Amino acid sequence: MFRRSIPEGYALVFPFDGVGSRDLHMVFVPFAIDALWLVDGEVTKRKRLRPWLGLGFGRADTVIELPAGAADGVAVGDRIELRE
């Protein structure tokens, strides 16, 4: 929240201790993002969240936020490998 953008090639990764219902909101976020919900590295949901009003939720042990368009080639069931 309160950022003006997410740089290209950048992602915010939110790991959790276990699988559960995880929600995202776009209050105070003035730009769109792509969000991925993962369980054990497998995409369970992908959604583009709109600025200010976007809302998304899904079951996950990890949530990834990316610049809008960065997840265009990703589908539910794909496996994601996280690297620093």
Image (cartoon, rainbow, N blue to C red):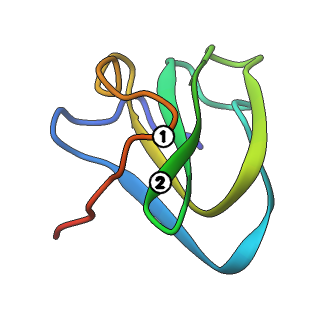
Residue 42 bears which disc, if any? 2
The image quadrant that residue 73 belongs to is top left
Answer left or right for 32 relative to 51.
left
Q: Quadrant of the N terminus?
A: top right
Q: Pointers 1 and 2 in contact (CB under 8 A)?
A: yes
- What amino acid type is highlighted by mark number 1? Gly
Residue drawn at (67%, 59%) of the image: 60
Residue 77 bears which disc, if any? 1
Query: Separation of disc 1 and disc 2 at Cα?
Result: 6 Å
Answer left or right for 1 relative to 59.
left
- Percent across and percent down for residue 72 are 33, 17
Residue drawn at (22%, 36%) of the image: 7
Within 10 Å of the Cα at label 1, are there few (<14), some (14-19), or many (20+) other Cα atoms? few
Residue 45 bears which disc, if any? none
How many numbered badges does the structure rendering display? 2
- Percent across and percent down for residue 34 are 47, 28
Answer left or right for 12 relative to 18.
left
Q: Quadrant of the C terminus?
A: bottom left
Nearest to N terminus: mark 1 or mark 2: 2
Residue that extends furthest to the bottom in the rendered view of this protein? 17
Answer left or right for 67 relative to 35.
left
Seen in the picture, residue 15 relative to 25 is either above or below; the reply is below
The image quadrant that residue 2 belongs to is top right
- Percent across and percent down for residue 25 are 75, 36
Residue drawn at (76%, 44%) of the image: 58
Within 10 Å of the Cα at label 2, are there few (<14), some (14-19), or many (20+) other Cα atoms? some
- Percent across and percent down for residue 15 are 54, 73
Dot 1: element: loop
Dot 2: element: strand
Q: Nearer the viewer, residue 16 or 73?
A: 73
- What amino acid type is highlighted by mark number 2? Glu
